[in-house]
Amino acid sequence: MSLVRPLNPVLQAIACKELNEVPHRVPQDIEALREWVLKQPHLRACTEDQFLLAFLRGTKFSLERAKEKFDRFYTLQSSIPEVFNERRLATDPQVLDIIRMGVILRLPLDPNDPGPCVTIIRAGSYDTGKYKFQDIIRVGSMFGEIMMFEDENATVSGYVEIMDMAGVTGAHLFALQPQLLSKFSAYADEAMPTRQKGIHFINVPPAFETGFNSLKSFFPAKIKSRISVSSDPEAISQLVGRECLPKEYGGSAGTMQDISEAMEVKLSSYAPYFQDSQSFGTDEKLRDIGARVHQDHRSSFGAVGSFRKLEID
């Protein structure tokens, strides 16, 4: 029996219409993908039902595309070692500090809201002398995987990231590392099964607004059209309903501390997964010879991969 949660009627309708999901066929689709994964000698990977289902939804239930994206998910992680490393654990003190500071806020949505999930990254809220931007991205990547397991809004409707630039200093701007942003955005687009619906920079100092618009040049062409930059302090309310925002942003969804505490509890429940994920990845020496026909192709951020670049929405 397939161990996946049923979708609510609205999300199920979206999944059927936009993702080609056929509910009664989902268990056999998952099993087909799992059988393929287990036959790949070069892959060490999670094979839980809900995790595999995220890849099927992310490729509109094309089994071949799901295989390619699944392989790329683990292959490209090795190309960003500053993010995917030994600190990527639910018990790591640095990870917990970043959560407790409210640098990353995963906004709670109304259960009946069929829209994309929303994350706020408060880019000016951390000490650049203590943390690097890659440390913030690492924590974000962990919650990105958690949403693959349990956020149907993310796996069906996608996700939106809001980069709040309030309080940024020259040190924060330097720490943003545009090339890392570009690499990770490409990884999110090419390898993550959840669909990125937008990246919105808000509270950008007016004097820097033009410069921030130039950041688009560091992102893959497909992502550029989904980026917006604004210095308007009310911009966030045009992107997210106030009922989903914490009080500090003029909303009614509790405080940032409430959200951070819930995130810490959630992360703790995934401690075994992140411990196991330390051994997940690919061993290129064991990759099937038949798959090597694609080895000369590279991803959009230059990392050697095993497959052609896909145009997956």
Image (tube, rainbow, N blue to C red):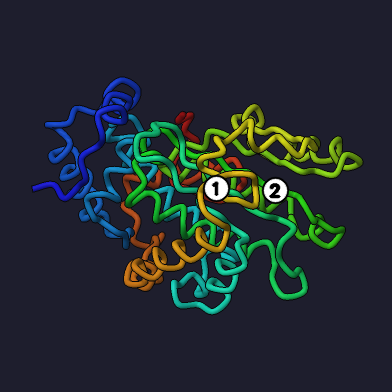
Q: Which mark is residue 164?
A: 2
Q: Residue 45 occupies which quadrant of the picture?
A: bottom left
* Kind of residue at disc 1: Thr
Q: Residue at x 34, y 68 (%)?
A: 269
The answer to whether residue 164 is above or below residue 236 is below
Q: Residue at x 70, y 32 (%)?
A: 228
* Kind of residue at disc 2: Asp
Residue sitting at the far left: 1
Q: Residue 28 occupies which quadrant of the picture?
A: top left
Q: Which mark is residue 207?
A: none
The disc, 2 or 1, on the residue closer to the chain's N-terminal end is 1
Residue 221 drawn at (x, y percent): 64, 30
Of 227 and 221, nearer the camera is: 227
Q: Is residue 95 left or right of residue 45?
A: right
Secondary structure beneath disc 1? strand
Between the C-alphas of marks 2 and 1, the distance is 10 Å
Secondary structure beneath disc 2? strand
Q: How many marks?
A: 2
Q: Is residue 95 left or right of residue 165?
A: left
The answer to whether residue 22 is above or below residue 123 is above
Residue sitting at the far top: 17
Residue sitting at the far right: 207
Q: Residue at x 21, y 55 (%)?
A: 38
Q: Residue at x 41, y 54 (%)?
A: 145
Residue behind mark 1? 119
